Image: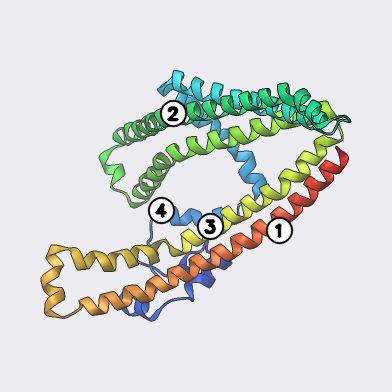
C-alpha cells in the first residue's frame, strides 16, 4: 500500500524535503508521492545516517563474506582476480619508478639528445609497465565477469535452501514475510558487492604501491600522498551519499512515470484509453512528472560539479605541495 514519506519513522531531513515537491499530475493520479511499505524501507533511515567510519569498519566483514563465497564457487577465477590486482599494483609501482627515472634524466645537465638517450631505458620500462597493467586489468575484468554470476547463484542457493527449511505455517506470518523479502535484496547485492570489492582492492593496492615508491624516494612524500587522496575520498563519499538519497526519494516517482507510458502500450488497456480519450492526459502527466525528474538530475549534476571542484582544488594544492617537496 502506498504511504507518504513522512510516515516513515526513519525518514531523514532530505527525504521529508523531497516529499513536498509533488507535481499536480502526481497528486491527481496517485494522491501524492508513492512509497511502498516494503521491508527494506525500515532500513532507509539508518542508512542515511550511517557515518563513513561505520561503513569502513563494516567493509572488511562484507568483503570477507564475498571472498569466502567466491572461493567455494570458483577458486581459479578468484585467484585470477587477486593475482591480476596484485600484478597491477606491481606494474603501477614500476611505472612510478620509471617516471622518476625519466624525470631525473630529463632534468639533468647536458645536451637534450644525450638526456633523451639516457632516459630511453626508463621510457621502455614505463611502456612495458603500461602494457602489462592494461593486460592485467583486462584479465581481472574477465575473471570478475566469470565469478560474479557464480557468487550470485551461490548466495541465492544458500538463501532459498534456508527458506525451504522453514515451516509453512511460519512463512505465512507477516513479520517472517518481511524478513524473507528483505533477504532477496541481499542476494541481488552479492554480485555488485563483488564488483565493488574488486574496485576497492584495486585502489588500495595502487595506493600501497605508490606509498612504497614515495617512501623509498623520501619519507616526507608519504604524508603528501594521503593529503592528495583524502579530498578525492571525501568527494566520492559525499557524492555517493547524495546519489543514494536521491534514488531513495525518487525511485517510486520514476516507477510511476514509467507506468504512465506502459499503459499506452498494454493491449488490455488500449480500448479503455481510447474510449475515454485518456491518452492525451497520460502523455501530459508524463511530461509534467518527467520535468521533475530532469530537474532533480540537474540538481545532482550541479552538486556533483561543486563537490568535484572543491575536492579537485584541495587535491591540486596538495599535489603542488608534493611536487614542491619532491
Going by the picture, which residue comes out furthest to the top?
76
Q: Which residue is mark 3?
A: 243
220 left or right, relative to 47: right
Tell me where residue 302 appears, x and y as whole percent.
58, 65
**Left or right: where 307 falls relative to 33:** right
Say which quarter of the image contains residue 206. Answer: top right
Query: Alpha carbon of mark 4 to alpha carbon of mark 1: how far?
Result: 37 Å
The residue identified by callout 1 is 310
**Residue at horizontal 37%, vertical 43%?**
184
CA neighbours of label 1 inside 10 A, class few (<14), some (14 to 19), many (20+): some
Look at mark 2 in the image and give the residue it sits on: 142
- Above-or-below relation of 200 to 47: above
Nearer the N terminus, badge 3 or badge 1? Answer: 3
- The span from disc 2 to disc 1 (Cα, nearest Å) is 36 Å
- Residue at 51% x, 31% y: name it: 65
Q: Which residue is mark 4?
A: 39
Residue shown at 45%/69% (left/top)? 294
Q: Position of residue 1 (x, y in %)?
A: 33, 64
Residue 159 quadrant: top left
How far apart are the alpha carbons under marks 3 and 1?
A: 18 Å
Amino acid at each position: 500500500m502506498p504511504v507518504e514519506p513522512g510516515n516513515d519513522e526513519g525518514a531523514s531531513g532530505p527525504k521529508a524535503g523531497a516529499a513536498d515537491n509533488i507535481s499536480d499530475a502526481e497528486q491527481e493520479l496517485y494522491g501524492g508521492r508513492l512509497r511502498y511499505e516494503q521491508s527494506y524501507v525500515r532500513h532507509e533511515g539508518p542508512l542515511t545516517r550511517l557515518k563513513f567510519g561505520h561503513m569502513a569498519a563494516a567493509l572488511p566483514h562484507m568483503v570477507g563474506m564475498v571472498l569466502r563465497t567466491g572461493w567455494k564457487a570458483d577458486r581459479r577465477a578468484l585467484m585470477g582476480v587477486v593475482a591480476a590486482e596484485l600484478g597491477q599494483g606491481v606494474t603501477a609501482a614500476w611505472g612510478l619508478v620509471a617516471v622518476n627515472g625519466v624525470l631525473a634524466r630529463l632534468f639533468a645537465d647536458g645536451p637534450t639528445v644525450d638526456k633523451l638517450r639516457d632516459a630511453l631505458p626508463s621510457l621502455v620500462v614505463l611502456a612495458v609497465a603500461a602494457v602489462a597493467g592494461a593486460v592485467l586489468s583486462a584479465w581481472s575484468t574477465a575473471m570478475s565477469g566469470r565469478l560474479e554470476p557464480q557468487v550470485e547463484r551461490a548466495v541465492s542457493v544458500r538463501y532459498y535452501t534456508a527458506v525451504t527449511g522453514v515451516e509453512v505455517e511460519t512463512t505465512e506470518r507477516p513479520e517472517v514475510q518481511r524478513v524473507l523479502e528483505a533477504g532477496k535484496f541481499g542476494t541481488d547485492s552479492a554480485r555488485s558487492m563483488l564488483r565493488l570489492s574488486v574496485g576497492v582492492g584495486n585502489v588500495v593496492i595502487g595506493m600501497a604501491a605508490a606509498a612504497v615508491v614515495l617512501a623509498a624516494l623520501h619519507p616526507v612524500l608519504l604524508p603528501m600522498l594521503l593529503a592528495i587522496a583524502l579530498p578525492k575520498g571525501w568527494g566520492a563519499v559525499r557524492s555517493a551519499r547524495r546519489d543514494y538519497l536521491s534514488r531513495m526519494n525518487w525511485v517510486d516517482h520514476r516507477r510511476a512515470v514509467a507506468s504512465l507510458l506502459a499503459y499506452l502500450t498494454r493491449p488490455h488497456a488500449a480500448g479503455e484509453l481510447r474510449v475515454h480519450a485518456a491518452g492525451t492526459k497520460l502523455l501530459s502527466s508524463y511530461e509534467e512528472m518527467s520535468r521533475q525528474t530532469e530537474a532533480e538530475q540537474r540538481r545532482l549534476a550541479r552538486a556533483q560539479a561543486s563537490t568535484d571542484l572543491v575536492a579537485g582544488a584541495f587535491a591540486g594544492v596538495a599535489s603542488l605541495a608534493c611536487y614542491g617537496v619532491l
